[in-house]
Image (cartoon, grey):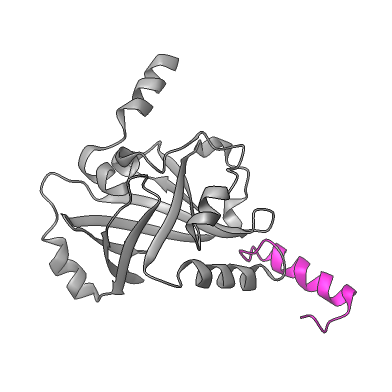
């Protein structure tokens, strides 16, 4: 597209926007893929998480990549989860270990599995836990220079929403200035991890705050 004259380039951009292609600019897809490659370059996950208000998200999520996720835990020591994505478009098994005290880093190993393997593993679900249902909206933000993942939870966890950003290094994560529209950083709060949500539901401090307001 770099060889196109400005008029044609602008026209192509307009067509992409009208078509609701999930890009923030004409080279948004390239930036998205490049950043994803950077943050997934090794097996260490470096991620910050913020609690957000679903009604106060300053993005048009209809233009984002959308993933319907069903997440079930079959072990907590080590943490092993399985996912059904987009109603069976893809299945994964993920093992997470060595979570740091501040919740910022952990080792992550993920593989794709078949539908049959998923069903077999589903029968090994941890007793007393729920399957976590959420819709993930993922996109590249030009201003922040990061790929953002917004999780809107459903079913038993309805009313809960997170912003997650994965970084290529601890230094990047620590130096990142959080957006002003988030409620608070919950990276170091174990009760906000998805595994804890599967076991205990929405953290009590959220419901306590809601009751205080109401």
- Residue in the foreground of this view, choosing between 79 and 64: 79
Q: Is residue 20 magenta?
A: yes
Q: Residue furthest bottom?
A: 3
Span highlighted in magenta in the image: 1-24
Tell me what residue is drawn at x 82 percent, y 84 percent: 3
Tell me what residue is drawn at x 34 percent, y 71 percent: 90
User: In the rendering, at what x and y percent does residue 118 appear?
Assistant: 21, 69
User: In the rendering, at what x and y percent does residue 157 appear?
Assistant: 33, 40
- Residue in the foreground of this view, choosing between 100 and 94: 100
Q: Is residue 3 above or below residue 109?
A: below
Tell me what residue is drawn at x 43 percent, y 57 percent: 46
Q: Is residue 28 visible?
A: yes
Quarter of the image with the N terminus is bottom right
Q: Is residue 214 visible?
A: no
- Residue in the foreground of this view, choosing between 148 and 14: 148
User: In the rendering, at what x and y percent does residue 33 appear?
Assistant: 56, 72
Q: Is residue 209 above or below residue 194?
A: above
Q: Residue furthest front?
A: 171
Is residue 25 rendered to the left or right of residue 197? right
Residue 56, picture quadrant: top right
- Residue in the foreground of this view, choosing between 131 and 39: 39
Tell me what residue is drawn at x 37 percent, y 44 percent: 102
User: In the rendering, at what x and y percent does residue 13 appear?
Assistant: 76, 69
Is residue 41 rendered to the left or right of residue 177? left
Q: Is residue 55 above or below residue 84?
A: above
């Amino acid at each position: 597209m770099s060889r196109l004259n400005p008029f044609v380039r602008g026209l192509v951009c307009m067509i992409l926007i009208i078509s609701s292609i999930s890009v923030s600019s004409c080279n948004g897809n390239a930036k998205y893929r490049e950043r994803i490659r950077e943050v997934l370059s090794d097996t260490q996950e470096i991620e910050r998480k913020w609690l957000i208000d679903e009604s106060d998200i300053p993005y048009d999520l209809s233009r984002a990549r959308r993933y319907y996720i069903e997440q079930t835990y079959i072990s907590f020591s080590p943490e092993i989860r399985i996912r059904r994505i987009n109603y069976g478009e893809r299945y994964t098994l993920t093992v997470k270990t060595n979570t740091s005290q501040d919740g910022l880093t952990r080792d992550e190993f993920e593989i794709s599995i078949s539908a049959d393997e998923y069903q077999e593993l589903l029968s090994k679900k941890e007793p007393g836990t729920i399957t976590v249902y959420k819709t993930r909206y993922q996109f590249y933000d030009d201003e922040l220079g990061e790929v953002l993942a917004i999780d809107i939870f459903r079913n038993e966890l309805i009313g809960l929403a997170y912003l997650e950003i994965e970084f290529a290094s601890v230094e990047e994560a620590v130096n990142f200035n959080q957006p002003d529209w988030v409620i608070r950083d919950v990276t170091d709060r174990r009760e906000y991890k998805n595994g804890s949500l599967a076991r205990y539901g929405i953290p009590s401090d959220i419901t306590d705050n809601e009751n205080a307001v109401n």
